[in-house]
Image (cartoon, rainbow, N blue to C red):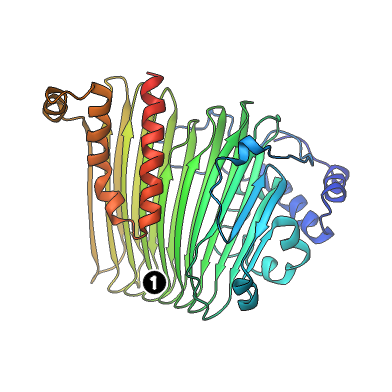
Amino acid sequence: MSEMTTEKFETYAKNAGEPRWFTEKRSAAFDKAKGLPMPSFQKIKYHRWPIQLEKELVFSKSELDENEKSVIDDSENLLIEFGQSTDTIKISEELKEKGVIVADLKAALTEHRELFERYYMQKAVKADENRLTAQHAAKVTSGALIYIPKNTIIEKPITTYFIQDATKSEDYVHHVLLISDSCSEVSYLENLLTVGNNETTANIIVEVIARPGSHVKFASFDRLGENTTTYLNRRGYLEQDAKIDWSMGMMNDGNIVGDFDSDLIGNGSHAEVKVVAITTGKQVQGIDTRVTNYGKHSIGHILQHGVILAKSSLIFNGIGHIIHGAKGADAQQESRVLMLSTKARGDANPILLIDDNDVSAGHAASVGRVNEEQLYYLMSRGLPKKLAERLVIRGFLGPVLTAVPSISVRKRLSDMIEEKLIDGQENE
């Protein structure tokens, strides 16, 4: 990690218009980072990757051109950020009247300090959890605060596009804090993209705080660039009777560690985690998905399917942990990997940690190759091999897609899968 002095932090703060209290948090996290261990994930060997934040903290501005904006779907409630710059913030008058907040990092620090400071790296992810979270707290340069007030139900989704500016040689350090207050409900659609081809490091943390009785539908569509090495941490903190539906499409082109956790703190809390991943070329995607049952009668289900092409690698860790005292808890998981190449590598690792009686837990895991009889049948009907492969893959991923509650999210995931598969087949 590059050496940072108080003067360098203050220079960044001045250029970015950052308040002093947050700069002090940066400095404290930086001082702790070197003494903290790197996070550990079974069978994910990433320590030789350029995943630590080595570059100096520098303030910069970026601007999307019209061609780059063409990939963005318009939405009534929309936030677009490119690099460290905010391109668009648009929320309906209805949401404004209800007190919904959609703010970029600068506004969160200055206009919503009390709310942001109360939850930022306090409950879901702690700054001193490991070296990568501490580096993140020291060098975060962009992000968003989304707040849904008590008893507020939002029918139309809040959509965000967070676009890494890899036309510059700088770390992409991004933070999202989503707070769904008591008995509220929200659908949130997050898109992670890359523009540019420089070799870069991304460190992205998303914290979702689900207050009692709230319901968060979280969908993400990730396509970070081939030359971007990423640590992506998404964490849910669920209070009593709260629910989070996670639907994540991991279509990235570079090496990535996905650290996805749901902490079921409250009694009756419920997390449904669905992950679809496709790896191509020589990339490695290591996905560590954990649900920890602390509350009584809490429910945690993991469903993840992945496809591997060419010489790439995909590792699924599925971890269900029932803590002592979580009577009546339920932890279930399924991880399946399909390999389309003899040179590919896949792992599906089920882990159950049960520290109490009177609970329910189970797992399923498989790693296998494409069904040659299915391919032969489709090709005998006149379909080209690559199209036949894509149809078999879509059938394999079907159980995850059909389990996604939102029709629009299912459609978007299907389109992303098709795009990633076509790109992967062309590069084989």
**At 77% from the left edge and 50% from the top edge, which residue is drawn?**
27
**Mark 1 Cα-neighbour bin, 10 Å: few <14, some 14–19, many ≥20:** many
Left or right: where 231 falls relative to 112:
left
Q: Residue 180 in the image: x percent, y percent?
A: 53, 70
Where does the N terminus fall, quadrant-wise? top right
Q: Residue 29 in the image: x percent, y percent?
A: 70, 51
Left or right: where 397 falls relative to 209:
left
Q: Residue 278 in the image: x percent, y percent?
A: 37, 35
Q: How many tags in the picture?
A: 1
Question: Residue 302 versus residue 263: which sits nearer the camera?
Answer: 302
Question: Residue 247 versus residue 268: which sits nearer the camera?
Answer: 247
Left or right: where 425 falls relative to 172:
left
Question: Residue 42 versus residue 54: which sits nearer the camera?
Answer: 54
**At 37% from the left edge and 28% from the top edge, which residue is drawn?**
422
Q: Residue 323 in the image: x percent, y percent?
A: 36, 65
Where does the C terminus fall, quadrant-wise? top left
Q: Residue furthest bottom?
A: 151
Q: Quadrant of residue 326?
A: bottom left
- Res 52 visible: no
**Label 1 residue SS:** loop
Looking at the rendered structure, the kind of residue marked 1 is Ser
Left or right: where 152 falls relative to 99:
left
**At 77% from the left edge and 36% from the top edge, which residue is drawn?**
3
Asked if 98 appears above or below 425 in the picture, the reply is below
Asked if 12 appears above or below 111 in the picture, the reply is above
- Res 195 visible: yes
Pointer 1 residue = 269
